Amino acid sequence: MAGDFNAEQKRYLEGFASGIAAARLTGGLALGGGAAAAPSEPTGPDAIHIKAQDKTVKDGGKLCDQEKWKRAENPFDGHNRLIREAAAGTQPKPEDNFRWRYHGLFWLAPNKTHYMCRMRIPNGILQHWQFAGVADLADAHGGPYTHVTTRANLQVREITPEHGQAFLDGLTDLGLTARGAGADNIRNVTGSPTAGIDAQELIDTRPLAKSWHNWILNDRSLYGLPRKFNVAFDGGGVMPVLEETNDIGFQAVEVVEGAGVEPGVWMRLVLGGISGHRDLARDTGIVLKPEDCNLVADAIIRVFIENGDRTNRAKARMKYVLDAWGFDKYLAAVEEKLGRKLDRVAPEHVAPRKPTDRFSHVGVHRQAQDGLNWVGVVLPVGKMTTDQMRELARISSECGDGQIRLTVWQNFIFSGVPDAKVAEVESRVAALGLTTKAAGIRSGLVACTGSNGCKFAAADTKGDAILIADHVERTVSDLDVPVNVHLTGCHHSCAQHYIGDIGLIGAKVPVGEDGDMVAGYDIVVGGGFAENPKIGTEIWKAVKAEDCPGRVEALLKTYIALRTSKDESFQAFTARKGPEALRDAAEEQPVLKAAA
């Protein structure tokens, strides 16, 4: 009989059968006329998720589509089917788009008809040959460029369906993986970009990030969470990793005498960061030994797996469990899983974090090792061509220690550059059309994918970011300090607009009497991170994209005119003046008065 059906009919029947299976599992269909047999107790690595789904349904909840898709066919179990269909050039259905994300591939329709691959690069560190190898893979299977992300990661685009698995296989050959890089999983593990080379750091985060990375990869029960999850390790060095924007942040701190625990370096636990929802991670008071980070993170995530919202994607992050329960109840559940109490230390027994350098990711900086330096390279909103990548890999190999260290600022640093090689590195980077200079606006410019490649984005963030930078460089010639400007396309806040000096979030702006909509932004100011964490304040709403360069110009000119000195940062200036007063003063600038 199977031969009587064409390919489309077979595909329909497979989907129908999957739907029936999902309905049975979630209580949607009763079998036969009598009472259904009691379901057996779930077992195996997916049991924790199945039990959480069952509890949701038993309590009267309706599973969201993504939970039904996971239940109907686990994305790992469906991998071979996905490969077969992709090999024929088949564009994935929504549920298979979701499943492919478990393997690191994102179908970008309706904006694009190709995949984007996001990798897993623990602590953001690549060997030069891996970096060049990714460039070769991009040329062979995708577009001739890559993007550095705000999780110190790489993305490759323009991968057609039949090239998807070949690209993933190529990553494996390079010792890399994309497993779990998308969907409801723990995302790329970030750590201090200058780990092991920073004279100020308290601990080298590289072993911690790699250990947690491997912990995740080898435990299937940690896939299929209620929603995505971020973990970061900060070593206390000069370059922050923005751990306060993560669900779990581990901060290296120095505990002093009288704390009730042994003095020395501990990892402080902060929880609940999700800057797009206007929340930064908060100190729990808990400190732990570095070797205990994996066990504690595992327990925190399992409490989230069991209690996170599986009905409403907008409320499915850990923050909302913390909001509903409070930190004390959540941490008590974690301690119950661990079978022991965790150590707590009062804030007065923790030495203050040493100051960070907001632009240590750009330019030349002394390493802890005598005679060596790291050199930060500015990338235009995180983009590099594959030709640039191969030459950058050669520079790393010939002039440094052979490593490329990606940062959460969408750029990278060379490490291990001897004093005698610094000028050569700067010259060779400049010859590629890039720069190592930290000045003005470009070195602090961060932008998400935007509407050019993401269906959620309301504006072309990367394109608009470049237009803003071009405009500011023409009109604000006396900008003598770096300023962070973050553009994000939607409420997911992948570019973390709320922690920038100036942040822009995509919005549709009504124009004309017919109510037509054009791309634009809401604008916030005064965000911060590291020793000055703060969620920015919205000052303008629904500004057309074409008007945003003038708004940024006005803010910067107001800052330069009214700051107390060059040493007063934009964030400090905004805090002193107040966001509303800054807005009012900016609106008196000629560029905005002329447009009024």
Image (cartoon, rainbow, N blue to C red):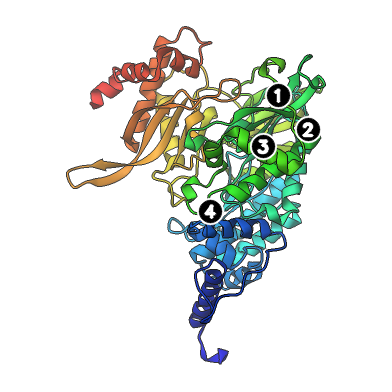
On-image quarter of the N terminus: bottom right
Front disc: 4 or 3: 3
User: Quarter of the image holding residue 469?
Assistant: top left
Q: State the separation of the CA atoms marked 2 and 1.
A: 16 Å
What is the three-letter code of the residue carrying label 2?
Answer: Pro
Residue carrying label 3:
332
Give the image location of residue 439, x and y in percent: 54, 22
What is the three-letter code of the residue carrying label 3?
Answer: Ala
Q: State the separation of the CA atoms marked 3 and 2.
A: 21 Å
Q: Is residue 418 visible?
A: no
Q: Say which element carries label 1.
A: loop
Q: Residue at x 74, y 54 (%)?
A: 219
Q: Are marks 4 and 2 in contact (CB under 8 Å)?
A: no
Front disc: 4 or 2: 4
Residue carrying label 4:
310
Q: Residue at x 44, y 10 (%)?
A: 563
What is the three-letter code of the residue carrying label 1?
Answer: Gly
Closer to the N terminus: mark 3 or mark 2? 2
Residue carrying label 1:
237
Q: Is residue 174 above or below residue 540?
A: below
